[in-house]
Amino acid sequence: MKNNIIYIFCALFIQNVFAQKPQTPTPSEIYFKIEKLNVLASAMYIAAHPDDENTRLITYLTHHDKAYTNYLSLTRGNGGQNLISNELGTDLGVIRTNELWNARNIDGGKQFFSTADDFGFSKHPKEAFSKWDKDLLLKQMVYMIRKEQPDVIVNRFDHRTEGTTHGHHTASAQLSKLAFNLANDKNYKGLSQENAEIWQPKRLFFNVSWFFFGSKQAFDKADKSKYIPLNIGVFYNQLGKNNQEIASLSRSQHQSQGFGDMSSRGEEIDYVELVDGDALKSSNLFEGIDTSWNRIKGGNKIQPLVTQLIKEYDFKDPSKSINLLTKIYSEIDKLPETIWKTRKQNEVRELIKNCAGLFLDITTNEPYTTPNENVDVKVEVANRSNQNIVIKDVTINNKKKSVGKSLADQEVYYDYFQTKFTNQDYTNFKFIDNFNDFKNQFNSSIKNEIGLEVNGVYLSYTLPIQYHYKDVVKGEIYKPFHVVPAVSVQFKQPVYISNSNKNQNVSVVLSNYSDVEIDGKIIINKNEDTEISKKIREKVPNLVSLVLFSDETTFNLKPNEKNKEIIINKDFTEGKYFVGHNNGLSIVGTSGETKWVDYNHIPLNYYLKDSEAKVVSFNKSVLKKSKIGYIVGAGDEIPQVLKDVGYNVDFINLETIKSEDLSKYETIIVGIRAFNTESSLKTKNRLLFDYVKNGGTVITQYQTNGNLQTEEIAPYKLSIGRTRITDENAVVQFINPNETVLNKPFKITQENFKNWVQEQGLYYADEFAGEFQPVFTSHDFDEKDTNGALLIAKHGKGHYIYTGLSFFRQLPAGNTGALELFINLIELKNE
């Protein structure tokens, strides 16, 4: 038995290993890759978020131009919305990061990120740069350009249109415009870790699209004389697919954003505008750029060999190309070190594997392990060609084993290893703020490789260890294999509502991922920024946290025991609490919360996070209503908060609900985007209106103005605009301070709008009938007042409320001011 005290990592990590069965491409697909060997062109696409990218153009660059193409997304999208679950923030960033990787696997591009945080919508690049470190992001972008050496750069957005689109969008283009020339400035001091030569791309483009003109009709009428047309409606014979068909599959990976796409065929024109660099006489973005092997010193010897390879390729027996491929590999190996040498050797190495029909696999029958536990690993190598293949060595977890086994046609080699992993490689890269990993690559120090010899040429193939098993319904399944901390500890809820002068029950959930029994202590600390702590911090500037409260509770976990709940009853006063916070020190086998992100369309992931909860004091005696009905939309965590406050909350099934069923509820709440996601509201909206007419209260939270299931979201005219207040601390002006909703049961003041997170609200109403009464006005800096954030209409005996205020963020974050206002809406009395 081993004893552990639960600690946690302060830094945020994520692990991802792509899980898929080893694939062998068809002879036509192999030929397509061989043709690409003779093209040494490179492009970089730049935007702000996952899903910003134009997959049609990326597919065109990778397939038609056969260019090495990467997409640099400044953020991972963690500040956006989520249409497939209620997970937001970091969880959403993990989802969208993986959706991007899925997309690139389809369209052929590579994916990179900067360290910019997606803090939510911004109206102007100045706002973006007020929260981002502009100099750091510029250095990162310059580094990427110098490292990746693109011939052309394409911006998704226009650097000249400040204030007309998301501030992140314009900021990405402005950074790109600066980096385009700075990358070639030897006097520009880059990142301290930088090891890349200066580089000047030849051209910088802006990828024009109809949505910059407001509509397709307006774009059709626009003067396009300064734009360069690209016919992206190409059919790729070897692949049997149109450019748009590949691009739509790529686009459809962004499931969390509702970007499922329809494919198309035939001619389709995309446009780019030259922003900087050499002028063009044609629609070839690489015009005048030597994209042949001649661009590398000594590369003129390679070009004829690849041309011969293309000419002699046998679609019936691709293995006949192996001899020439190994010769090409050896010739490339003689070239001076350049990025193209690395890229092309990687391509040839993969082609040799494909042409030989090689099956390379490293698997385990366990989904995860913990540090210092034994793991059984299986290695499989199958030669499915008449080419003699020699297995020289196998490396598992950095330990190399010499093999020296020759494989004939259809011969299969198996080997078995037992290994242990240590804690330093729980994960492969930090999620947001680690420079070394911001590029997206897995920089794990763990190596798992299979070394082969083909025609006297040594080739090493790096593979992930994958969890391999049989599902009785689906058959053979591959999933990522993970190394996780032995124990995960977390608060059951992010917010606890506490009655004054009473001890609070706080639930802590523990899971044991190891095969041994574990005894330990749960440590709960409270950190506060009080006046006393601020003075101490001034004297001790390196102090990470100041513990003002500490509690220890012992626990026992059986081997592999999961989700054990321990209830701790203490005097938890209002504030923020951490489980096992130890100022970032990591202990073998211990952590805070191991947070799993599990969806069918992306690999199973986990990341390690601080487990924290907020205790909020709240006088539940003010509640007069009891039963609440909730219509779930895109998903949020408000129902749980309302249950904690003391309400009985039912989820309403729109498919079966009848008018008489609604009468039991004292208030009905419509979740975010429900009118976008729930088709039943096309007809069941009338039930809500009748419910209000008969004396009920309906609170409809924000809905987007696009793709509404019905325009009738209220009993009176109400049109949703795109107005939002991005300043979470924007001052409000109450139109009628004596209004009931501002006074009962809580007195609402300016204090209620302090310490909000990310934004004050979004998708405010821009046009509404006179029956609606706005409650307050507010505005972002240097903008006019808007009054569509909170509207209340009397309808019959009841009230219908529309609000764009971001309660879905504030209540789960434990914002007392927002909670009091929301309670006032719920408790609004009807006649």
Image (spheres, helix red, strand yellow):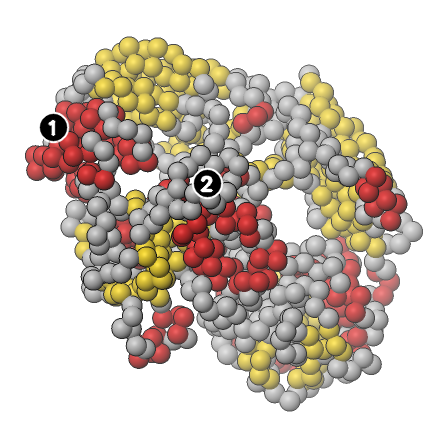
Q: Residue at x 14, y 21 (%)?
A: 386
Q: Position of residue 175 (x, y in %)?
A: 47, 55
**Residue 377: in sight, yes or no?**
no
| As drawn, 816 above or below 739 | above
Name the residue tied to disc 1. 320
Name the residue tied to disc 2. 440
Q: Position of residue 341 (x, y in %)?
A: 28, 32
Q: Position of residue 594 (x, y in %)?
A: 61, 36
Residue sitting nearer the eye, 333 or 645: 333
Furthest-left residue in this view: 312
Q: Position of residue 525 (x, y in %)?
A: 79, 38
First along the sequence among labels 2 and 1:
1
Q: Which label lies toward us, 2 or 1?
A: 2
Q: Residue at x 28, y 52 (%)?
A: 61
Furthest-front residue in this view: 187
Q: Residue at x 82, y 81 (%)?
A: 738
Residue sitting nearer the eye, 292 or 235: 292
| As drawn, 369 above or below 549 | above
